[in-house]
Amino acid sequence: MIPPSFEYFRPKTISEAVALLQQHGDEAKILSGGQSLIPMMKLRLARPGFLIDINRIAGLSYIKEDGGFLKIGGLTREAELEASSLIRSKYPIIHDTASVIADPQVRNLATVGGNLAHGDPANDHGATMLALGAQVVATGAKGQRVIRIEDFFVSIFETALKHDEILTEIQVPIPPAKSGGAYFKLERKVGDFATVAVAAQVTLDGNGACQKVGIGMTNVGATPLKAKKAEDFLRGKKLDEAGINQAAQLAADESQPSPDLRGPAEYKKGLVQELTKRALASALKRASR
Ligand SMILES: Cc1cc2nc3c(=O)[nH]c(=O)nc-3n(C[C@H](O)[C@H](O)[C@H](O)COP(=O)(O)OP(=O)(O)OC[C@H]3O[C@@H](n4cnc5c(N)ncnc54)[C@H](O)[C@@H]3O)c2cc1C
């Protein structure tokens, strides 16, 4: 399919891109990796009149630790996350996530900023960033503001970003010692969106009990969901089999899947339960190393 016609801009700075967004209002869209936007345009589900390609803006792609945070530039590609030794060694949950998104061709172009900004509950980074307690930096005409990831996802395909804001950075608090996380996804075939996926991140205290815990769920609601009851239940407890099972049940209860071609709602709740168990067990193992 051929997308409807549009006007194309290739700004060299963020302020130029923001000015274009302001000038063209609701009809303008940022183009990053194009791996969600272009297919939607080809299917005529999106018809932006103006595309603002931010790929030529320097300094938007990086992965570094700075000021207590892991900082990921908005334009960082999935393939860069996958290849990063820092991500592999210290943030395996992000490596797990990036490496199950689509296929290598898509991952060469798709960006983390685009993945979050798209606001698709089936996108994988949302749940992981919820588990990690991340925040995003939005840059607009008035400068930068920081949005907690918990406040970022508003509804299906809707985020807290204003129309003239660009997601320029993702900030993940550097996890203390004895932390670990994992992302488990079930897909119908390699390269598919998740039928269901679960992210879990834990920090253990000196007695091996759960000091901090984050659990995020993919594609079981209108937005990526945080399993708050499961988290509350686990805080202060040892991650033994009974505790993990109880938390997994709570996460399944909190999930709000809809029936679709990937399966009925009850099946998806069962998957939340199983994948929560696996993600927590793997997070515990990684935190105990
Ligand atoms: C075959 C296929 C399979 C896929 N499978 C998966 C999968 O398994 N899991 C998964 O998570 N995703 C999957 N995707 C989606 C893919 O990961 C997308 O790339 C990602 O959702 C969007 O990133 P992008 O950089 O391509 O964004 P784009 O397509 O360029 O943009 C997407 C939306 O976000 C906006 N946007 C982009 N960047 C910014 C920014 N920095 N600031 C503000 N707004 C911005 C755009 O205006 C647009 O509305 C798949 C895509 C394809 C084509």
Image (spheres, rainbow, N blue to C red):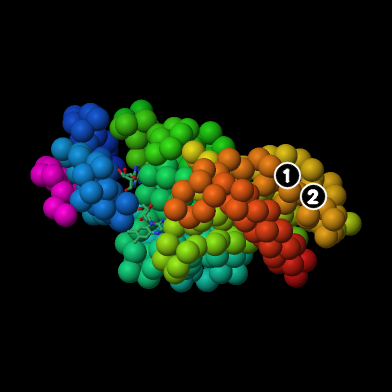
Residue placed at 14% from the left, 53% from the top? 2
User: Does residue 136 belong to the magenta stretch?
Assistant: no
User: Does residue 10 belong to the magenta stretch?
Assistant: yes
Q: Do the residues labelled 1 and 2 touch (CB within 8 Å)?
A: yes
The location of residue 68, given as percent across then percent down, is 60, 50
Task: Determine which residue is flagged by label 1.
Answer: 250
- Relative placement, left or right, of 238 versus 223 is right
Residue placed at 41% from the left, 35% from the top? 158
Amino acid bearing label 1: Leu
- Which of the 4 image quadrants contains residue 150? top right
- Some atom of ligand 1 lies within 8 Å of the CB belonging to the residue at label 1: no
Task: Determine which residue is flagged by label 2.
Answer: 246
Examine the residues drawn in magenta and state their main secondary structure: loop
Q: Is mark 2 on a helix, strand or loop?
A: helix
- Relative placement, left or right, of 258 versus 191 is right
Q: What stretch is highlighted in magenta?
A: 1-12
The location of residue 97, given as percent across then percent down, is 52, 61
- Which of the 4 image quadrants contains residue 289? bottom right
Residue 12 in view in this figure: no
The location of residue 137, given as percent across then percent down, is 45, 40
Residue at the extreme right of the image, as rendered: 207
Residue placed at 84% from the left, 46% from the top? 236
Q: Which mark is residue 165?
A: none
- Relative placement, left or right, of 135 versus 200 is left
